[in-house]
Amino acid sequence: MLKKILLVLIVVLSLMACQKPLADKDYSDFEHMDHWDELNDLPNGEVVLFYYSPYCVISRSIEDEATEYFVILENSGIPVILIHEGLIFEQGTQPLEVIETPSLLIYEDGEFMEIISGAKPVTEYLKAKVK
């Protein structure tokens, strides 16, 4: 009986050791866009831009969940670039009016595709994207 318990314990511990936990990150750990002109240099394929303000309570409230999704997206090959609202303000010509934080701007091959704004729509889009 003791051998069975030890065997089960070894198997469980081995499986737990094989699981790779997601890195604990915050917004500052991701690549940031400093100037709107950088939109001209986006990589081919899909790119997710996240427009946020660290001073916005709503942006901060989804930080843990959003950054987990960002890690998963980046690990799957989809670049995620963050845009700090306060630091990019008046840095070049803003290509479209983004008035709400948080917002996702989705680009495909350098072309704007859609904008998703608000905490719930942003997290729902990211959750669906990583599945």
Image (tube, rainbow, N blue to C red):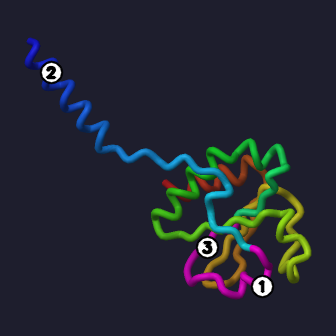
Q: Amino acid at mark 3?
A: Val
Q: Amino acid at mark 2?
A: Leu
Give left or right: position of 1 versus 128: left
- Labels 2 and 3: the sequence-earlier one: 2
Kindly identify which residue carries mark 3: 47
Question: Secondary structure under badge 3?
Answer: strand
Whether the magenta-drawn stretch holds residue 42 is answered as yes
Q: Amino acid at mark 1?
A: Asp
Q: Quadrant of the N terminus?
A: top left
Image point (67%, 55%), residue name = 27
Q: Which mark is residue 49?
A: none
Give left or right: position of 111 versus 129: right
Residue interval drawn in magenta: 34-49
Image point (69%, 68%), residue name = 32
Residue 99 x, y percent position in the rendering = 89, 63
Whether the residues at callouts 3 and 1 have beta carbons within 8 Å, the answer is no
Q: Residues within 10 Å of mark 1 (few under 14, many from 20)?
A: some
Q: Residues within 10 Å of mark 2 (few under 14, many from 20)?
A: few
Question: Secondary structure under badge 2?
Answer: helix
Q: Residues within 10 Å of mark 3 (few under 14, many from 20)?
A: many
Q: Which mark is residue 37?
A: 1
Marks 2 and 3, Cα distance to the nearest angstrom? Answer: 48 Å
Q: Above or below — where is 80 with respect to 45? A: above
Q: Which mark is residue 6?
A: 2
